[in-house]
Amino acid sequence: MKFFIVAGEASGDVHGANLARELLKIYPNAEFSGTGGINLKSLGQKQYFTDSDMAIIGFVEVFKKLPFIFNMFSTLENAVAEEKPDAVILIDYPGFNLRFAKKLKKYNIPVIYFIAPQFWIWHYSRIFTLKEYCNLTISILPFEMEYFKKENVNAVYVGNPVIDNFKFNFSNKNEFLKTLSFSGNRKIVGILPGSRKREISSLMSAFIDAALEYDDIDFVISKADNISDELIKQFVPEKNNIKILPKAQYDIMKYSDFIWACSGTVTLETAIMKKPMIIVYSASKINVFLAKKLSNLRTIGLPNIIAGYELLPEVHCVGEGSAKKELVIEAYNKALSNIDAINEELAKISAVFEGKTPSKTAAEKIAEILQK
């Protein structure tokens, strides 16, 4: 059995690898090709492009890289035509993958879309692309199913695959504290600055400048695998109450009392763990302007979108120096003043996703499609 998987981002690579492992349980001799990162490559995926190649963010950057994007389309289409896989699995990355789905129609190969595009924010017409060009759409947000039923899209909700990523290095909080040399007598704030160099470069100074205002709080900073020690250490002073902890993002979520997080999937993961947070993002003024003009988006964080309002304070980190710091501090104080309501709503959000086996269920649904 051959699967052509297109994952264009680091998160898609992780979710794709979890799905591929479940597919291997059903099809032990399965082969994988397409695009992805280190996780899919570790499972033997033949990669035409990596997730780093495909990490193109914002309207302006897309315009600059149009020749490269067109080359990706033609290269991958030719690969599908030559390999003739049993199924093509498109993971998130809608700006590219929805267009690619249209190109695959003529090959009469089952196309599965895993992690549906957020058409309910903008481009509602994308739901009709899913209906016409994909044999199965796998949803990871329960409220999407109302839209799919309304438009007669062949779709299934499997739970959210971020749950499959929850792996902990420490068996208890005491181990966590001992590693960091924290006493446990003070509040712990976890800082999740993201996994993209540009995010870290634009947000870390604001996080650290704000942290330096709190001598009575211990701070622990998550460092992603793909981020060098040198990049993150340049922002972090040598202080006993500010530590860096690599490869322990989920431990930081679990054992911290509060989280300062960059926008992205990490905010939903934190919400599922029922941890209060502020959501910080950095974007050019033109990207923010275009996003607001072209979408129904009024909040950035997925927990806020699910809640239907800005439950968790959001910070558009603009300005220089102290201006950014003050924005973070203001948002943190705002959250603390509303902490009971936040915790109550986070418990409701978390309950929606508990008890699911997303990757396993998705693999089973794909197998059902291939058996028809």
Image (tube, rainbow, N blue to C red):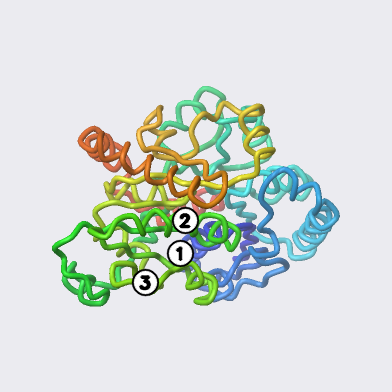
Kindly report which numbered mark, 1 or 2, lies closer to the viewer in this rendering.
Answer: 2
Measured from the top left, where is residue 278 in percent x and y? 38, 44
The residue at the point 23 percent across, 39 percent down is: 343
Measured from the top left, where is residue 39 in percent x and y? 53, 70
Mark 1, residue position: 26
Mark pair 1, 2: CA separation: 8 Å
Is 305 rendered above or below residue 134?
above
Task: State which tag comes first along the sequence, 3 or 2.
Answer: 3
Mark 3, residue position: 245
Q: Nearer the viewer, residue 265 or 136?
A: 265
Mark 2, residue position: 363
Which class describes the residues within 10 Å of circle 2: few (<14), some (14-19), or many (20+)? many
Quick one: SS at disc 3? strand
- Answer left or right for 18 relative to 6: left
Task: State which tag comes first along the sequence, 1 or 2.
Answer: 1
Tag 1–tag 3 contact (CB < 8 Å) = no
Measured from the top left, where is residue 12 in percent x and y? 55, 57
Residue type marked 3: Leu
Residue type marked 2: Ala
Tag 1–tag 2 contact (CB < 8 Å) = yes
Mark pair 1, 3: CA separation: 37 Å
In the rendered image, which quarter is residue 342 located in?
top left
- Answer left or right for 233 relative to 36: left
- Answer left or right for 287 relative to 106: left
Residue type marked 1: Ile
Is 274 rendered above or below residue 32?
above
Quick one: SS at disc 1? helix
